[in-house]
Image: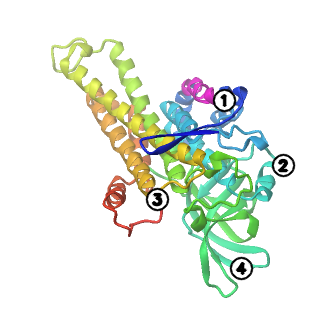
Protein backbone atom coordinates (compact mmCIF):
# COMPACT_ATOMS: atom_id res chain seq x y z
CA UNK A 1 0.00 0.00 0.00
CA UNK A 2 1.25 3.49 -0.81
CA UNK A 3 0.15 6.71 0.80
CA UNK A 4 0.00 10.39 -0.08
CA UNK A 5 -2.08 13.37 0.95
CA UNK A 6 -4.49 15.70 -0.75
CA UNK A 7 -5.70 18.74 1.20
CA UNK A 8 -4.65 17.02 4.41
CA UNK A 9 -6.68 13.89 3.72
CA UNK A 10 -4.71 10.65 3.41
CA UNK A 11 -4.78 9.03 -0.01
CA UNK A 12 -4.03 5.37 -0.41
CA UNK A 13 -3.81 2.75 -3.10
CA UNK A 14 -4.13 -0.96 -2.37
CA UNK A 15 -2.70 -4.03 -3.99
CA UNK A 16 -6.10 -5.40 -5.03
CA UNK A 17 -5.94 -7.69 -8.01
CA UNK A 18 -7.08 -6.46 -11.44
CA UNK A 19 -9.98 -8.93 -11.58
CA UNK A 20 -11.38 -7.75 -8.22
CA UNK A 21 -10.97 -4.09 -9.18
CA UNK A 22 -12.68 -4.63 -12.52
CA UNK A 23 -15.57 -6.49 -10.89
CA UNK A 24 -16.12 -3.70 -8.37
CA UNK A 25 -15.97 -0.96 -11.00
CA UNK A 26 -18.68 -2.78 -12.95
CA UNK A 27 -21.18 -2.62 -10.08
CA UNK A 28 -22.56 0.87 -10.86
CA UNK A 29 -22.93 -0.20 -14.51
CA UNK A 30 -24.91 -3.24 -13.42
CA UNK A 31 -27.12 -0.98 -11.33
CA UNK A 32 -27.69 1.32 -14.31
CA UNK A 33 -28.76 -1.71 -16.31
CA UNK A 34 -31.60 -2.35 -13.86
CA UNK A 35 -33.07 1.16 -13.94
CA UNK A 36 -35.75 0.38 -16.55
CA UNK A 37 -36.89 -2.67 -14.56
CA UNK A 38 -37.11 -0.66 -11.36
CA UNK A 39 -39.12 2.06 -13.10
CA UNK A 40 -41.58 -0.52 -14.43
CA UNK A 41 -42.03 -1.97 -10.95
CA UNK A 42 -42.02 1.31 -9.01
CA UNK A 43 -45.80 1.70 -8.81
CA UNK A 44 -46.23 -1.93 -7.70
CA UNK A 45 -43.48 -1.56 -5.13
CA UNK A 46 -45.26 1.46 -3.70
CA UNK A 47 -48.68 -0.20 -3.77
CA UNK A 48 -47.40 -3.37 -2.06
CA UNK A 49 -45.41 -1.30 0.47
CA UNK A 50 -42.39 -3.54 -0.06
CA UNK A 51 -39.88 -3.91 -2.87
CA UNK A 52 -41.12 -6.11 -5.69
CA UNK A 53 -39.56 -9.56 -5.47
CA UNK A 54 -38.55 -9.27 -9.13
CA UNK A 55 -36.39 -6.31 -8.13
CA UNK A 56 -34.82 -8.16 -5.20
CA UNK A 57 -34.04 -11.15 -7.41
CA UNK A 58 -32.47 -8.93 -10.07
CA UNK A 59 -30.39 -7.09 -7.50
CA UNK A 60 -29.25 -10.34 -5.95
CA UNK A 61 -28.33 -11.93 -9.28
CA UNK A 62 -26.36 -8.80 -10.23
CA UNK A 63 -24.40 -8.99 -6.98
CA UNK A 64 -25.81 -5.65 -5.85
CA UNK A 65 -26.86 -6.89 -2.41
CA UNK A 66 -23.36 -8.10 -1.59
CA UNK A 67 -21.42 -4.89 -2.23
CA UNK A 68 -20.08 -4.65 1.32
CA UNK A 69 -19.99 -8.37 2.08
CA UNK A 70 -16.46 -9.65 2.83
CA UNK A 71 -14.60 -11.29 -0.03
CA UNK A 72 -13.96 -14.15 2.36
CA UNK A 73 -17.62 -15.11 1.93
CA UNK A 74 -17.87 -14.35 -1.78
CA UNK A 75 -18.85 -10.69 -1.51
CA UNK A 76 -17.41 -7.70 -3.34
CA UNK A 77 -16.00 -5.91 -0.27
CA UNK A 78 -16.19 -2.73 -2.35
CA UNK A 79 -15.61 0.83 -1.22
CA UNK A 80 -18.12 3.17 0.38
CA UNK A 81 -17.93 5.23 -2.82
CA UNK A 82 -18.96 2.21 -4.89
CA UNK A 83 -21.88 1.62 -2.54
CA UNK A 84 -23.02 5.21 -3.07
CA UNK A 85 -22.54 5.09 -6.84
CA UNK A 86 -24.76 2.01 -6.98
CA UNK A 87 -27.39 3.60 -4.74
CA UNK A 88 -27.50 6.71 -6.90
CA UNK A 89 -27.99 4.62 -10.04
CA UNK A 90 -30.77 2.55 -8.49
CA UNK A 91 -32.46 5.71 -7.20
CA UNK A 92 -32.97 6.84 -10.80
CA UNK A 93 -35.38 3.93 -11.19
CA UNK A 94 -37.08 3.58 -7.81
CA UNK A 95 -36.38 5.42 -4.59
CA UNK A 96 -37.76 2.67 -2.37
CA UNK A 97 -35.69 -0.03 -4.05
CA UNK A 98 -32.54 2.10 -3.86
CA UNK A 99 -33.14 2.89 -0.19
CA UNK A 100 -33.76 -0.76 0.67
CA UNK A 101 -30.74 -1.99 -1.28
CA UNK A 102 -28.49 0.65 0.28
CA UNK A 103 -29.57 -0.22 3.82
CA UNK A 104 -29.24 -3.96 3.21
CA UNK A 105 -25.71 -3.31 2.01
CA UNK A 106 -24.76 -1.06 4.91
CA UNK A 107 -26.16 -3.71 7.25
CA UNK A 108 -23.79 -6.14 5.55
CA UNK A 109 -20.97 -3.70 6.26
CA UNK A 110 -21.98 -3.68 9.91
CA UNK A 111 -21.79 -7.46 10.05
CA UNK A 112 -18.23 -7.17 8.71
CA UNK A 113 -17.33 -5.30 11.92
CA UNK A 114 -18.29 -8.24 14.15
CA UNK A 115 -15.95 -11.03 15.25
CA UNK A 116 -15.35 -13.75 12.68
CA UNK A 117 -17.46 -16.19 14.69
CA UNK A 118 -20.54 -14.01 14.25
CA UNK A 119 -19.80 -13.45 10.56
CA UNK A 120 -19.57 -17.19 9.99
CA UNK A 121 -22.90 -17.75 11.70
CA UNK A 122 -24.49 -15.35 9.23
CA UNK A 123 -22.71 -16.20 5.99
CA UNK A 124 -21.54 -19.76 6.57
CA UNK A 125 -24.98 -21.34 5.99
CA UNK A 126 -25.98 -18.71 3.39
CA UNK A 127 -23.34 -16.56 1.66
CA UNK A 128 -26.16 -14.40 0.29
CA UNK A 129 -27.76 -13.72 3.66
CA UNK A 130 -29.22 -10.23 4.03
CA UNK A 131 -29.81 -8.08 7.09
CA UNK A 132 -31.86 -5.05 8.09
CA UNK A 133 -31.01 -2.58 10.83
CA UNK A 134 -32.67 -0.48 13.50
CA UNK A 135 -29.86 1.20 15.42
CA UNK A 136 -31.58 3.31 18.13
CA UNK A 137 -31.60 1.39 21.45
CA UNK A 138 -35.37 1.02 21.52
CA UNK A 139 -35.39 -2.39 23.22
CA UNK A 140 -34.58 -3.64 26.69
CA UNK A 141 -32.08 -6.27 27.75
CA UNK A 142 -30.98 -8.21 30.79
CA UNK A 143 -27.76 -10.02 31.38
CA UNK A 144 -27.79 -13.78 30.87
CA UNK A 145 -25.07 -16.40 30.93
CA UNK A 146 -22.90 -15.62 27.90
CA UNK A 147 -25.00 -12.80 26.47
CA UNK A 148 -28.18 -10.74 26.77
CA UNK A 149 -31.89 -11.49 26.62
CA UNK A 150 -33.60 -8.76 24.61
CA UNK A 151 -37.19 -7.63 24.17
CA UNK A 152 -38.78 -4.66 22.47
CA UNK A 153 -40.08 -3.06 19.32
CA UNK A 154 -37.79 -1.50 16.73
CA UNK A 155 -39.41 0.78 14.17
CA UNK A 156 -38.32 1.80 10.68
CA UNK A 157 -36.56 -1.50 9.87
CA UNK A 158 -36.24 -0.88 6.13
CA UNK A 159 -36.04 -4.06 4.08
CA UNK A 160 -37.07 -6.35 6.94
CA UNK A 161 -39.26 -8.40 4.57
CA UNK A 162 -36.18 -9.31 2.54
CA UNK A 163 -33.79 -10.01 5.43
CA UNK A 164 -32.69 -13.16 7.24
CA UNK A 165 -31.00 -11.22 10.06
CA UNK A 166 -31.62 -7.99 11.95
CA UNK A 167 -29.25 -5.61 13.76
CA UNK A 168 -31.11 -4.09 16.72
CA UNK A 169 -30.00 -1.35 19.08
CA UNK A 170 -30.02 -2.33 22.75
CA UNK A 171 -28.68 -1.09 26.08
CA UNK A 172 -26.19 -3.75 27.22
CA UNK A 173 -26.66 -4.34 30.94
CA UNK A 174 -24.76 -5.95 33.80
CA UNK A 175 -26.29 -8.55 36.11
CA UNK A 176 -27.11 -5.69 38.48
CA UNK A 177 -29.22 -4.07 35.77
CA UNK A 178 -26.76 -1.22 35.29
CA UNK A 179 -26.37 -0.12 31.67
CA UNK A 180 -22.81 -0.73 30.51
CA UNK A 181 -22.90 0.62 26.95
CA UNK A 182 -25.03 0.88 23.85
CA UNK A 183 -24.96 -2.26 21.75
CA UNK A 184 -26.12 -3.64 18.43
CA UNK A 185 -27.54 -7.15 18.63
CA UNK A 186 -27.34 -9.45 15.61
CA UNK A 187 -30.52 -11.57 15.63
CA UNK A 188 -31.98 -14.11 13.18
CA UNK A 189 -35.24 -12.87 11.69
CA UNK A 190 -36.92 -16.18 12.52
CA UNK A 191 -36.69 -15.16 16.19
CA UNK A 192 -38.54 -11.93 15.48
CA UNK A 193 -41.97 -10.89 14.25
CA UNK A 194 -42.87 -8.02 11.91
CA UNK A 195 -45.67 -5.59 12.69
CA UNK A 196 -47.22 -3.78 9.74
CA UNK A 197 -46.74 -0.16 10.83
CA UNK A 198 -45.30 1.49 7.69
CA UNK A 199 -48.12 3.70 6.34
CA UNK A 200 -46.50 6.85 4.99
CA UNK A 201 -46.63 9.46 2.23
CA UNK A 202 -43.29 8.61 0.62
CA UNK A 203 -40.77 5.78 0.45
CA UNK A 204 -43.76 3.50 0.86
CA UNK A 205 -42.04 0.59 -0.84
CA UNK A 206 -39.21 0.31 1.70
CA UNK A 207 -41.40 -1.79 3.99
CA UNK A 208 -39.87 -0.02 6.97
CA UNK A 209 -42.06 -1.82 9.46
CA UNK A 210 -41.55 -2.63 13.14
CA UNK A 211 -39.66 -5.75 14.24
CA UNK A 212 -40.48 -7.25 17.63
CA UNK A 213 -38.42 -9.42 19.99
CA UNK A 214 -39.83 -11.13 23.08
CA UNK A 215 -37.20 -12.63 25.33
CA UNK A 216 -34.66 -13.51 22.63
CA UNK A 217 -31.22 -14.63 23.80
CA UNK A 218 -28.28 -13.04 21.93
CA UNK A 219 -24.78 -14.41 22.64
CA UNK A 220 -22.10 -11.88 23.51
CA UNK A 221 -20.13 -12.39 20.30
CA UNK A 222 -23.18 -11.20 18.36
CA UNK A 223 -23.41 -7.89 20.25
CA UNK A 224 -21.36 -5.01 18.84
CA UNK A 225 -20.47 -2.12 21.12
CA UNK A 226 -21.79 1.01 19.42
CA UNK A 227 -19.97 3.02 22.06
CA UNK A 228 -16.64 1.57 20.89
CA UNK A 229 -17.63 1.65 17.23
CA UNK A 230 -18.15 5.41 17.33
CA UNK A 231 -14.47 5.64 18.28
CA UNK A 232 -13.49 3.41 15.37
CA UNK A 233 -12.88 0.36 17.58
CA UNK A 234 -14.31 -2.77 15.94
CA UNK A 235 -13.99 -6.39 17.09
CA UNK A 236 -13.27 -7.91 13.66
CA UNK A 237 -10.03 -9.83 13.65
CA UNK A 238 -9.30 -8.91 10.01
CA UNK A 239 -7.39 -5.69 10.52
CA UNK A 240 -6.11 -5.60 6.93
CA UNK A 241 -9.61 -5.17 5.46
CA UNK A 242 -9.80 -1.43 4.91
CA UNK A 243 -13.56 -1.35 4.29
CA UNK A 244 -14.20 -2.48 7.85
CA UNK A 245 -12.08 0.35 9.23
CA UNK A 246 -14.40 3.02 7.77
CA UNK A 247 -15.70 5.59 10.25
CA UNK A 248 -18.88 4.27 11.84
CA UNK A 249 -21.39 7.12 11.73
CA UNK A 250 -20.20 8.66 8.43
CA UNK A 251 -20.52 5.31 6.64
CA UNK A 252 -24.01 4.72 8.04
CA UNK A 253 -25.22 8.22 7.25
CA UNK A 254 -23.81 8.22 3.72
CA UNK A 255 -25.77 5.10 2.86
CA UNK A 256 -28.96 7.15 3.29
CA UNK A 257 -27.86 9.91 0.94
CA UNK A 258 -27.19 8.15 -2.36
CA UNK A 259 -30.84 7.18 -3.04
CA UNK A 260 -31.76 10.86 -2.62
CA UNK A 261 -29.27 11.85 -5.30
CA UNK A 262 -30.63 9.10 -7.53
CA UNK A 263 -34.17 10.40 -7.13
CA UNK A 264 -33.11 13.88 -8.22
CA UNK A 265 -31.25 12.44 -11.21
CA UNK A 266 -34.30 10.37 -12.14
CA UNK A 267 -36.52 13.43 -11.95
CA UNK A 268 -34.21 15.37 -14.25
CA UNK A 269 -34.20 12.52 -16.77
CA UNK A 270 -38.00 12.30 -16.76
CA UNK A 271 -38.47 16.01 -17.34
CA UNK A 272 -35.87 16.10 -20.12
CA UNK A 273 -37.60 13.14 -21.79
CA UNK A 274 -40.95 14.90 -21.54
CA UNK A 275 -39.55 18.11 -23.02
CA UNK A 276 -37.97 16.14 -25.87
CA UNK A 277 -41.49 15.21 -27.01
CA UNK A 278 -42.01 18.82 -28.02
CA UNK A 279 -44.87 19.80 -25.73
CA UNK A 280 -45.82 23.44 -25.30
CA UNK A 281 -46.40 25.67 -22.27
CA UNK A 282 -50.06 26.18 -21.46
CA UNK A 283 -51.44 29.73 -21.62
CA UNK A 284 -48.42 30.98 -23.58
CA UNK A 285 -47.44 31.23 -27.24
CA UNK A 286 -44.68 28.62 -26.75
CA UNK A 287 -45.56 25.56 -28.83
CA UNK A 288 -42.27 23.96 -27.77
CA UNK A 289 -41.30 24.47 -24.14
CA UNK A 290 -37.64 23.90 -24.98
CA UNK A 291 -37.57 27.23 -26.84
CA UNK A 292 -38.59 29.20 -23.74
CA UNK A 293 -35.76 30.93 -21.84
CA UNK A 294 -37.60 30.08 -18.62
CA UNK A 295 -37.33 26.37 -19.43
CA UNK A 296 -33.71 26.62 -20.46
CA UNK A 297 -32.58 28.47 -17.35
CA UNK A 298 -34.57 26.26 -14.99
CA UNK A 299 -33.22 23.06 -16.53
CA UNK A 300 -29.70 24.43 -16.22
CA UNK A 301 -30.34 25.34 -12.59
CA UNK A 302 -31.75 21.91 -11.78
CA UNK A 303 -28.84 20.12 -13.46
CA UNK A 304 -26.33 22.26 -11.59
CA UNK A 305 -28.03 21.50 -8.27
CA UNK A 306 -27.84 17.77 -9.03
CA UNK A 307 -24.16 18.14 -9.93
CA UNK A 308 -23.53 20.00 -6.67
CA UNK A 309 -25.17 17.21 -4.70
CA UNK A 310 -23.04 14.67 -6.56
CA UNK A 311 -19.79 16.48 -5.82
CA UNK A 312 -20.53 16.75 -2.11
CA UNK A 313 -21.62 13.13 -1.84
CA UNK A 314 -18.59 11.72 -3.60
CA UNK A 315 -16.17 13.98 -1.73
CA UNK A 316 -17.56 12.65 1.53
CA UNK A 317 -17.33 9.05 0.30
CA UNK A 318 -13.73 9.51 -0.79
CA UNK A 319 -12.83 11.05 2.56
CA UNK A 320 -14.28 8.07 4.43
CA UNK A 321 -12.57 5.57 2.15
CA UNK A 322 -9.21 7.34 2.29
CA UNK A 323 -9.12 7.57 6.07
CA UNK A 324 -10.09 3.89 6.28
CA UNK A 325 -7.28 2.96 3.88
CA UNK A 326 -4.80 4.97 5.92
CA UNK A 327 -5.52 2.91 9.03
CA UNK A 328 -5.99 6.06 11.08
CA UNK A 329 -9.20 7.19 12.82
CA UNK A 330 -11.16 9.84 10.94
CA UNK A 331 -10.93 13.13 12.90
CA UNK A 332 -14.03 14.76 14.33
CA UNK A 333 -13.69 17.76 12.01
CA UNK A 334 -13.80 15.50 8.96
CA UNK A 335 -16.66 13.45 10.34
CA UNK A 336 -18.61 16.64 11.01
CA UNK A 337 -18.00 17.77 7.44
CA UNK A 338 -19.41 14.48 6.17
CA UNK A 339 -22.62 15.19 8.08
CA UNK A 340 -22.68 18.61 6.42
CA UNK A 341 -22.05 17.13 2.98
CA UNK A 342 -24.97 14.74 3.46
CA UNK A 343 -27.22 17.60 4.48
CA UNK A 344 -26.11 19.46 1.35
CA UNK A 345 -27.07 16.47 -0.79
CA UNK A 346 -30.56 16.52 0.73
CA UNK A 347 -30.98 20.27 0.28
CA UNK A 348 -29.72 20.43 -3.30
CA UNK A 349 -31.66 17.34 -4.37
CA UNK A 350 -34.91 18.78 -3.02
CA UNK A 351 -34.19 22.16 -4.60
CA UNK A 352 -33.49 20.52 -7.96
CA UNK A 353 -36.74 18.59 -7.89
CA UNK A 354 -38.67 21.70 -6.90
CA UNK A 355 -37.35 23.46 -10.01
CA UNK A 356 -38.18 20.46 -12.17
CA UNK A 357 -41.74 20.40 -10.85
CA UNK A 358 -42.06 24.03 -11.91
CA UNK A 359 -40.92 23.11 -15.41
CA UNK A 360 -43.24 20.12 -15.66
CA UNK A 361 -46.19 21.96 -14.15
CA UNK A 362 -49.34 20.74 -12.42
CA UNK A 363 -49.41 17.60 -14.59
CA UNK A 364 -46.60 16.33 -12.36
CA UNK A 365 -49.07 15.64 -9.58
CA UNK A 366 -51.37 13.31 -11.47
CA UNK A 367 -51.60 9.93 -9.71
CA UNK A 368 -50.14 8.12 -12.69
CA UNK A 369 -47.22 10.53 -13.15
CA UNK A 370 -43.93 9.17 -11.74
CA UNK A 371 -42.65 12.63 -10.82
CA UNK A 372 -45.07 12.98 -7.93
CA UNK A 373 -43.86 9.67 -6.49
CA UNK A 374 -40.24 10.82 -6.84
CA UNK A 375 -41.19 14.04 -5.08
CA UNK A 376 -42.88 12.21 -2.19
CA UNK A 377 -40.00 9.75 -1.87
CA UNK A 378 -37.41 12.51 -1.82
CA UNK A 379 -39.33 14.69 0.62
CA UNK A 380 -39.74 11.72 2.97
CA UNK A 381 -36.30 10.12 2.71
CA UNK A 382 -34.46 13.40 3.09
CA UNK A 383 -36.13 13.98 6.48
CA UNK A 384 -34.39 11.03 8.10
CA UNK A 385 -32.99 12.09 11.47
CA UNK A 386 -29.40 11.34 10.41
CA UNK A 387 -29.75 13.75 7.48
CA UNK A 388 -31.40 16.72 9.26
CA UNK A 389 -29.70 19.78 7.66
CA UNK A 390 -30.33 22.09 10.61
CA UNK A 391 -28.63 19.67 13.00
CA UNK A 392 -25.78 19.13 10.53
CA UNK A 393 -25.25 22.90 10.38
CA UNK A 394 -24.87 23.08 14.14
CA UNK A 395 -22.57 20.04 14.32
CA UNK A 396 -20.29 21.36 11.58
CA UNK A 397 -20.31 24.91 12.94
CA UNK A 398 -19.26 23.73 16.39
CA UNK A 399 -16.48 21.63 14.87
CA UNK A 400 -15.20 24.58 12.82
CA UNK A 401 -15.22 26.81 15.89
CA UNK A 402 -13.38 24.27 18.02
CA UNK A 403 -16.25 23.84 20.48
CA UNK A 404 -15.60 20.51 22.18
CA UNK A 405 -19.13 19.87 23.43
CA UNK A 406 -21.23 18.49 20.61
CA UNK A 407 -24.99 18.10 20.33
CA UNK A 408 -24.99 14.45 19.25
CA UNK A 409 -22.83 11.36 19.70
CA UNK A 410 -23.61 10.41 16.09
CA UNK A 411 -20.75 12.12 14.29
Q: Is residue 50 visible?
A: no
Q: Among all residues in the image, which is located at the extreme right?
A: 125
Dominant secondary structure of the residues highlighted in magenta in the image:
helix
Looking at the image, which residue is at 67% across and 82% down?
A: 174
Q: Residues within 10 Å of mark 2 (few under 14, many from 20)?
A: few
Q: CA distance from mark 4 to mark 2?
A: 28 Å
Image-based side of 176 in relation to 364, left or right: right
Q: CA distance from mark 1 to mark 4?
A: 44 Å
Q: Which residue is mark 4?
A: 143
Q: Earlier in the sequence, mark 4 or mark 2?
A: 2
Secondary structure at badge 3 equals loop
Please name which of the two marks, 2 or 1, marks the residue nearer to the observer: 1
Q: Which residue is mark 2?
A: 125
Looking at the image, which residue is at 63% across and 34% down?
A: 55
Q: CA distance from mark 2 to mark 3?
A: 35 Å
Secondary structure at badge 2 equals loop
Secondary structure at badge 4 equals strand
Q: Which residue is mark 3?
A: 411
Image-based side of 20 in relation to 389, left or right: right
Q: CA distance from mark 3 to mark 4?
A: 29 Å
Place residue 157 in its image quadrant.
bottom right
Q: Position of residue 255 (x, y in %)?
A: 53, 46
Amino acid sequence: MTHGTTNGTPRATTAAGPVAVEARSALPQRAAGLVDLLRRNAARTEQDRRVAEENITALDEAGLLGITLPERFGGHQASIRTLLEVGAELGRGCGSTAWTASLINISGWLIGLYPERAQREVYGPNPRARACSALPPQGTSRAADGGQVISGRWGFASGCHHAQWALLGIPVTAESGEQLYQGLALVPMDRLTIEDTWHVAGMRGTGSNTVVADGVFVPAHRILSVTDARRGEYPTEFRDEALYRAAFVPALALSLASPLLGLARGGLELVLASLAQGRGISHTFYADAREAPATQTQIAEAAQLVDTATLHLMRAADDVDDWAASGRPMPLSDRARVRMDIATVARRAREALDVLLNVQGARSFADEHPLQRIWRDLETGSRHAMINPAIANEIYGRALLGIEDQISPLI
